[in-house]
Image (cartoon, rainbow, N blue to C red):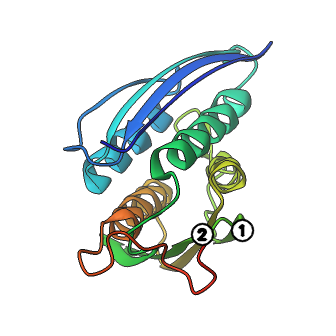
């Protein structure tokens, strides 16, 4: 089973996270931030990843450190789980509707960290969650996973729907990318021979 486990403790957060790419979508998540818990639960279910997250953070300040550090840990766990990338399909994409919202996600498990986040959520908050932290989460993930990630909002007005569509599209695109290609299961998916 392709799995990564990360423990990270700073003055701001104390995190234990495990990710299994060949899972069934089971999750056990507590970050101290209800909205992030909801998004990570969706990510696990739609990616069919098994994900466990425990985060104790300085939520008395705000959710910034917890959200960013969970993104860091998820990226590192993904990098560990994917290993040398032998046999994976490498690319994934999804255009996902969520009621009036429509979000495109395309990604490349390339070893090159890049984020193009073209999402316009006009609401500053979803409940007590700052919507600008969604981009911080994805930026932390790509920096630590080496994934090239494009998330583009094609339509939408409701902040919750847009965010949910982004996380679901991300999960389903990542699921495609990490699937084993049975025709080249022992090969690195690059003409360079390495990712």
Residue 67's place in the image compared with 48, above or below, is above
Relative placement, left or right, of 176 versus 55 is left
- Quadrant holding the C terminus: bottom right
- Residue found 54% across the figure and 43% down from its top: 80
- Residue found 51% across the figure and 47% down from its top: 78
Residue 28's place in the image compared with 141, above or below, is above
Q: Percent from the top left, x then y, of residue 161?
A: 40, 60
Residue 115's place in the image compared with 23, above or below, is below
SS at mark 1? strand
Tally of marks: 2
Q: Percent from the top left, x then y, of residue 177?
A: 40, 69
Q: Nearer the viewer, residue 82 or 29?
A: 82
Relative placement, left or right, of 4 versus 142 is left
Q: Percent from the top left, x then y, of residue 171?
A: 39, 58
Spatial CA distance of label 2 from label 1 is: 6 Å
Q: Percent from the top left, x then y, of residue 98?
A: 32, 67
Q: Assess disc 1: are there few (<14), some (14-19) or many (≥20) residues with their C-alpha within 10 Å of its C-alpha.
A: many
Q: Assess disc 2: are there few (<14), some (14-19) or many (≥20) residues with their C-alpha within 10 Å of its C-alpha.
A: many
Q: Residue under label 1, please give it.
A: 114
SS at mark 2? strand
Q: Residue under label 2, please give it.
A: 149
- Residue found 54% across the figure and 74% down from its top: 108
- For the residues bearing labels 2 and 1, Cβ distance under 8 angstroms: yes
- Mark closest to the chain's N terminus, 2 or 1: 1
- Quadrant holding the N terminus: top left
Relative placement, left or right, of 158 versus 119 is left
């Amino acid at each position: 089973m392709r799995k990564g486990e990360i423990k990270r403790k700073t003055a701001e957060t104390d995190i234990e996270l495990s990710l299994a790419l060949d899972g069934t979508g089971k999750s056990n998540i507590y970050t101290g931030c209800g909205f992030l818990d909801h998004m990570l639960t969706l990510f696990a279910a739609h990616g069919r990843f098994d994900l466990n997250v425990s985060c104790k953070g300085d939520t008395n300040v705000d959710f910034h450190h917890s959200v960013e550090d969970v993104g860091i840990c998820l990226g590192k766990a993904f990098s560990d789980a994917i290993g040398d990338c032998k046999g994976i399909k490498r690319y994934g994409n999804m255009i996902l509707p969520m009621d009036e919202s429509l979000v495109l996600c395309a990604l490349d498990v390339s070893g090159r960290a890049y984020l193009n986040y073209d999402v316009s959520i006009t609401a500053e908050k979803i409940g007590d969650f700052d919507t600008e932290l969604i981009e911080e989460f994805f930026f932390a993930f790509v920096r630590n996973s080496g994934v090239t990630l494009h998330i583009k909002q094609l339509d939408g007005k409701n902040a919750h729907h847009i965010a949910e569509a982004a996380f679901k599209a991300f999960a389903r695109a990542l699921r495609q990318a990490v699937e084993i290609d049975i025709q080249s299961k022992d090969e690195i998916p690059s003409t360079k021979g390495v990712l």
